[in-house]
Every structure is written in structure tokens, then in C-alpha cells.
Image (spheres, coloured by chain):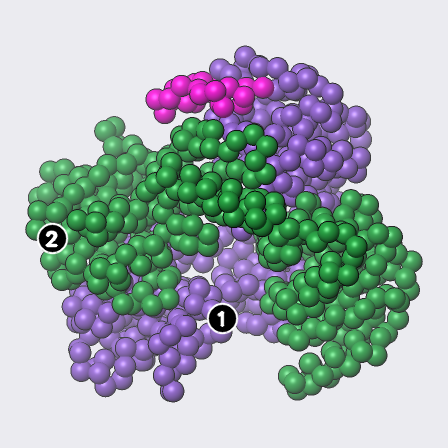
Chain colours: A purple, B green
Amino acid sequence: MSTAETIAIGSELIVGGRSDSNSLFIAEALAGIGIEVKFKTIVGDDQSDIAEVLTTACRRAGIVIMTGGLGPTVDDCTREAVAAVTGFRLARRKDAFESMRARLAQWGRIPNRGQLRQALIPSGATVLPNLVGSAPGFVLTWRNARVVALPGVPSEMQAMMQQSVIPGLSNQLDRSKQAHPHPITRVIFHTWGLPESDVDSKLQGLIQKRTPVALGLLASPTGVLVSLTTRAHRSIKEAVLLSLVEGVRTRLCDWIYAEGQGTLEEAVGRLLQQQKLTVGVAESCTGGLIGYRLTQVPGSSAYVDRGALCYSNQAKTDMLGVPARLIEQHGAVSREVAEAMAKGMRDHAGVSVALSVTGIAGPGGATETKPVGLVYIGLDGGGDDVMAKEFRFHGDRSVIRQRAAQAALDLLRRWLIARGEA
Amino acid sequence: MSTAETIAIGSELIVGGRSDSNSLFIAEALAGIGIEVKFKTIVGDDQSDIAEVLTTACRRAGIVIMTGGLGPTVDDCTREAVAAVTGFRLARRKDAFESMRARLAQWGRIPNRGQLRQALIPSGATVLPNLVGSAPGFVLTWRNARVVALPGVPSEMQAMMQQSVIPGLSNQLDRSKQAHPHPITRVIFHTWGLPESDVDSKLQGLIQKRTPVALGLLASPTGVLVSLTTRAHRSIKEAVLLSLVEGVRTRLCDWIYAEGQGTLEEAVGRLLQQQKLTVGVAESCTGGLIGYRLTQVPGSSAYVDRGALCYSNQAKTDMLGVPARLIEQHGAVSREVAEAMAKGMRDHAGVSVALSVTGIAGPGGATETKPVGLVYIGLDGGGDDVMAKEFRFHGDRSVIRQRAAQAALDLLRRWLIARGEA
């Protein structure tokens, strides 16, 4: 039972423009208890297709985790497919029904006919309660495989993985006579500001031949992700892995803005709180993305005071006191206006530090001297501590806006680190 | 050859936090020429695992499209896996090498040792030139399946699908003695405001038995997506599908905010432009998300004037003139403050319509009378046209913020529709 497969069910995952992210969460959670996901399959809402992939998965893996197709509508047929493959008949289960009724009652609703189907569970299966939504899941053993069926709604699936599936599999691993598999350990570093090839050069020669640790690099609009992965024995890991982790930290130093599940907005928030500072943001081309990211962190009201989305030139003048003449003279996308936006925000809001962004996200708006992707980021930390930096980003409108927000938050992070060390 | 499978190769797709979006593009492109993708598999960079899924796919489908694992690094082993499964030996191909050398030369580079491996192609395969990147693809026939191997970089894969793979498969369909499959048509409706079970009830009985059109429903934090899918003959389609599309529109009427690839922010932007109006937003708990979404639409500077992210109470007073006493009396999360925020935004900015949001996104901040998820949305359209509505959303911080932004944009959409009809 040391390898697993995932099956994501839903026609929208085939041509509906929606990609399966559940399986990433599941693979990560299973890796934590030493179980490796080797294959992931996606299949539409078709009972015989689901049956086909379930049969294949049970032949290859000890654990099969299915998501989706447990809802109340007619196209939800995971239950029927599992029954058809395993031969376990579906019957309405009292525990499943009661848990569903209780949940719907909280929302002031009673189960409708479709939802009654959600209480149909294959005989011999254990019901997995759903504390977030209405559809219960289940787990059963067929041939040599543990088959788990979970709802496709990410928040429901995640809660059930954490509350039921992972603890259940851990217990089973403890009881089994096999040696407990070594957990797969994966250390992740998030970097910003270096192209992938530069990250690669900086890490050349870090890992000696035959060291049982794999190095991975992955580029995205918000930076390059570096990973170290190993499933070696704990004692080897502690020695070797720790020294490699230190090696990555030393070589990539402050290009690393977060490790593991951390985000840039969390890193910035932590620094602001440590230094007891407040922040205000003045956004033009990012349109609110920086504010949205900063306030995504629970408790961010302790340091985020306000933001101005000054999209029009008039708004830059009204909200931040940027002189109309300055905009006329240098253009709204200029170093001067970025500085004035940051200054205006800091002065008006009385915050410790203000961040500003003005740029051309495209596709329109470019001039001969100012191409799409040109972005100025300003920062005012009080007194003479005012700066603005020029960036040139590539990509479409959405990518340019993402990169601009990332660069702005990273500029603030670096300013906070320098301030903390001074 | 009327069904296809995709295989996405790359360990980062298993636990790297990156989901496979290539297969969505491929399935969409194949649907256009009547080929249905039934299964999608994701596998890590492991030669024998790739061989296993390729064998399974060739057994089930007439067309297998593989993406990824054609790069220059040692973990790229798609070529080797295809050779191992099919028995076609790898050899360096002159056409593949020349096209790669030409591409690298454009960038002022010469092929390195790793890139030389990219010219290794299974014997009997046809080389697919890569006009965007350096790794060529290939296509071959094994047993009864057409096997296509493409790079994993989305821009390269997409160009090769459009330039080589789709035209090649179309030709083959034209030449084959089988009847040409009918293109698969899919119509999508995006709804907000009705739970999935209510959407289901409203669509009960819409599709008669034996009508060759499938109805799909998909719930998400931003609403329920409804789809109609058919691969019937064109003449049947036009008659039946059009009447079903009308049926969905009539039954779900203004719960539908967009069709196809459309978004709510585009729908709102279109209405604002038609009516020559400008908008300002005053956001508290959504933290800038509404502004970010509105400005995600190219050309939105024509109608988005500004936004105020008034996170602190002081910011609500400074930026929008919300009286401190009003906040003291009713709390920042109240109908009264939502109205005052919208009014303040409209008065200060001189925009046609102002939208406001204040709420408790959690996890902290709840009181006995004001639970997490309580959100007030205000709108000021001028004169007496001021309103605020109460919402209670479920979910975590991120979901509550998404739902609040969606509800706010939808309130604005409905107001604009009513105004346009008046």
C-alpha cells in the first residue's frame, strides 16, 4: 500500500476549462505519510468510463482516491461506478443520511430528492462524514486496494482528507506488518527576481552524485520554485537534507522570500508586525491586486491601513495629491508619478510605509517610448527614504499585473529586511 | 480514431503544486474536429511509469497525445518510454536537429549536450517542428493508435497543435473510410445566486429522453456553471440545441451572468460602457478584489475611475467621509456603514455609480451578533437610489471574500440591467 493513484471525476475537467487541483493537495498529504502518488487520472461523468479507470487504478496501486461525482444531480455517478466495479450494492445508509440532514438543517434546508441519493453508499464501505458540505464520502477495500471516494469541492475534500483519510491510512500503516514507508520529505523554496537559468547556475554542484535527494526547479509568473525531495531514511535525511537546505539558503540568500507553504504577503506581513509598522498601497495598473494579496492573510488588519486604486489621473490627484502638472509633464507611467503616489499615500494615510505601482499592463496604452510591460514601483518610508524603480515585464495583461504585484511586495520585503537590520 | 487520451508528463504535476492545463487546450482543440477526449492521465518523470500509461492509453484510444518530458535535462524521458513501448529505436534525426539548431541560432546559442538528445526520434516517426521553442515533437502509429509527443511548455504545445497536429488529424479523418465524426459542441452558462440544487430543479424536464444532448452542472464559490454538450449531426444540432439553449436562458433568466468564456466583470464592463457610466468601488473585507477583477478587463480604464480599500475605520472616515459616530453606533460591518461607504465614494469621486462591501471574512473578527461570513453590500446610483443588502456566506476566508466580490459585481450587474430597461 505504499503507492497511490488519484481519479478526478467531472466532465468539466475534460473540456470545461477547469483543471484538477484536488490531486495536488492529495498527493502532498499522502507524501507526508510516505505514500507516493504515481498516476493521476481524470475522467468525465460517465459511469462506464469511471469503472474503467477505477479497475485500472486498483490493479496498479494500493490506495485509490477518487474525487467528484458524489453530488445530488443526475450526472453524479461515482457511487454507481464503484458499485458496478466492486459488486458491492448501493443502499441508503442511516449514518450518511443523518449527517447530511444535520448539515442541511444548519443552513435551514431539508434534503431534496437529489440529495437523498447522496446517502446511497456501497455495502461494506465505511462512511466518511463531511463536516463542510452535504455529500458524505466513503472508503472500502476491494481486492488489494483501499478505495476512497470524496466530494470534488476542494474545501470539503481537504477537510475530509485531514480529518478522516490521512489518520485512517496512518493507523493502517501502523497496524500493518510491512515496514512503515519513509515519509517523502520535500522542502520548497520560493524565489523572486532571478530567471530560472540563473537559479540553476547558482545551484550547480550543490548535490553530490549518489546523494538520495532530487533537486527540482519550476518557473512561473511569480518566480522560480526550488524543491529538494527525498524519501531516504530519517537519520540520513537529517544529516544530508539539513546541509542541502542550508546550501540552498546560502546560495540563493535573499532571493528566497518564503519556504514551504509560505507566501510573499505572509512574509511581508510578518516583517511589518515584528517592526510594528503599518502600510498603505497606491495602485494603478495592478488594480487592487496588492491590497487583495496583503489582506488575504488572516489578521492583516493589524498592519494594512488602506489602499487607493487610483486608475484615472484625476483619482491620482484627488486621492494622493499627485500634481496634475507632474502627470502632464512625465506621464502617469513614470518614476516621478510613482514616487509622488507613494509620498501622497504616506502623507494622507499617516502610515509607516507606502507602496505604489503605475504601469502599462496592455494590450492597449503603449506609446513609442513606453512599451507594454513598463512598470514603476515606488516606496516611501518617511523623510528622505523615497524611491522608485523601473521594471520591464513580459507576458499578457494578467501576467504583467501578477509580476508587478509580486515585484512591489518583494521591494517592500527587502526594504523591511534592510530596515530591521539597520 | 474518434476517441483520444492525453498524457501529461512531469513530476511537478504530481506534487509540485502545478496543475496540468495543457490537456484542457488539447481536449478543446480535438472537440472542434469531432474527437472526444475520454481519459487524461498525469505521470511523473519515470520511464517505466510513462510506458505503463502509454500502453494503457493505446489499448483504449485511437489517438494519444503526450505532453512534456522532451526537454534537454536527464529527467526528460518521454522519448525513451515511447521507444521502449513501441520497439521503435531512437536515432538522431537530421530534420529534428536542423530545426532545433536554427531555433537556438536565432537566440544566439548553439545546442549543448542535453539539447542534442532532443534530436533523438523513434524510427518510423514523423518529426513535428517546434517554431516557438527548441524541442521538436513527433507522431507515429503503433498498433491502432496515433501517438503524438509534444513539449510541455504551453505556448510551444499550443502552436504545434494548431500548426501540425489538428491539420494532420483532419486530413487523416478526410482520407479514412469511416464517416467523419461530428464536431462536439458545448454551450456554457455561468450563473450566480442560486444553489446547485435549485438550478437543477429549474432545469428539470428540459431535456427529453433520447435527445442527444447532455446537461452538466458544476458548483464553485463563484456560482453554478451549466453546460449543454452534443455531438449530434449539424442539422439536428441547430434545431434541438438552439431550442435547449433558449430553454436554459428562459428558465435561468437573469441568474445567468455570462455565456461561454465570458466573465462577470466583462458583463458589468459592457453594461457600463453601453450606458456611458463610470464606477468607483469602496472595499473593506474584499481588500481590493473587486477593483482587481474590474480592471482585469482590457480597456476598463474607460469606466473604472477609482477604488478605496478602506481597511481601517479611520480609512473609512478619511477616504469616504463615513462619520466615526456611525461606525461606533452600528459597527463597521453594518447596513448603515455599507450605505455610507457607497455614498461617500460616489460623492468624492464624482462617478455615476459606487459599489461598497464591508463584512467579516474571518477567521477572527466575529461577535455574538455578527458571525464570520456576514457581509453588507452597498450601491449608490445617485439621488435616492441608495441601497445596502445583507448576505451570509459560508466557507473559509478566501471563499467568503470571493463570494462577496461576486455578489457585489452581480448586484451592480442587476442594477445596470434594470437601469437600462427603465
Instruction: Find residue B158 and name its label.
Output: none
Q: In the picture provided, is A307 more to the left or to the right than B126?
A: left
Q: CA distance from mark 2 to mark 1?
A: 40 Å
Q: Find numbered disc 1 in the image and state the secondary structure of the residue it sits on.
A: loop
Question: Circle 2 marks a residue in which chain?
Answer: B
| Residue B189, horizontal then vertical, whole percent | 44, 45
In the picture, the disc for residue B382 is 2
Q: Position of residue B206 (x, y in %)?
A: 47, 33
Density class for disc 1 (Cα within 10 Å; few <14, some 14-19, many ≥20) is some
Q: Is residue A309 visible?
A: yes
Q: Is residue A106 magenta?
A: yes
Which residue is located at x 89 percent, y 67 percent? B123
- What's under tag 2, amino acid-wise? Gly
> Eyeballing the image, is B365 above or below A320?
above
Residue A395's disc is 1
Q: Which residues are magenta?
A: A99-120
Q: Residue at x 34, y 38 (%)?
A: B193
| Label total for image | 2
Residue B167 on the magenta span? no
Q: Amino acid at mark 1?
A: Gly
Viewer-nearest of discs 2 and 1:
2
A297 to the left or right of A161 = left
Q: Nearer the viewer, residue B38 or A212?
A: B38
- Looking at the image, the residue that sits furthest to the top is A94
Residue depicted at 32% across the width and 78% down the height: A333
| Chain at tag 1 | A
